Image (cartoon, rainbow, N blue to C red):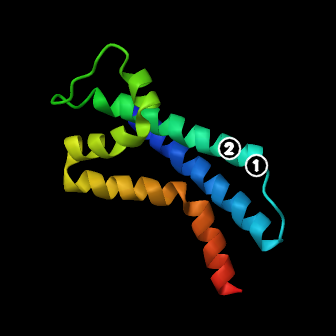
Amino acid sequence: MGANAIFLYALGGLSLLSVIYEGTLYWHDLEPNERLLNLWGAAFVLLVVLWINADSRKQPRLFRPFEYAQLVLLYWVPYLPYYFWRTRGVRGLLMLSALVVLYLSGWLVQWLLYVAR
């Protein structure tokens, strides 16, 4: 199992934990810990940046400057759509939308629980 798979599995696992945490608290009408949610957001961004850094090594058409990972971390918002489009085309934009849904999955579960009640 390569570094790409490890980062993606960690991203999926942490997303699942976040969904369970936020959904359970919403079901019981409790407020989530803001620090924990902020930590989740930072860990999500860090794992995405680490995945891009590992994945970009396998992309021959992509130029990687010396401090590539740091640049991706600093400019991750505009760089994510560019990276996915540049390396995978339309399929990359679908992957980007999947990442956005994964990030918003806790909110989506809360919304589904609200509709179900």
Name above or below for residue 97 compared with residue 58.
below
Q: What x and y, as percent, mark residue 51? A: 42, 35
Q: Does the image show residue 112? A: yes
Q: What x and y, as percent, mark residue 50? A: 45, 31
Lateral position of residue 111 relative to residue 32, left or right: left
Q: Residue furthest top?
A: 66
Lateral position of residue 57 relative to residue 61, left or right: right
Seen at 62% across and 61% down, the residue is 106
Quadrant housing residue 57 = top left
Q: Are marks 2 and 1 in contact (CB under 8 Å)?
A: yes
Residue assigned mark 2: 38
Alpha-carbon span between mark 2 and mark 1: 6 Å
Seen at 66% across and 53% down, the residue is 17
Q: Nearer the viewer, residue 9 or 95?
A: 95
Residue assigned mark 1: 34
Seen at 21% across and 56% down, the residue is 90
Seen at 21% across and 24% down, the residue is 63
Name above or below for residue 91 compared with residue 8.
below
Mark 1: amino acid? Glu
Mark 2: amino acid? Asn
Crowding near pointer 1: few (<14 within 10 Å), some, many (20+)?
A: few
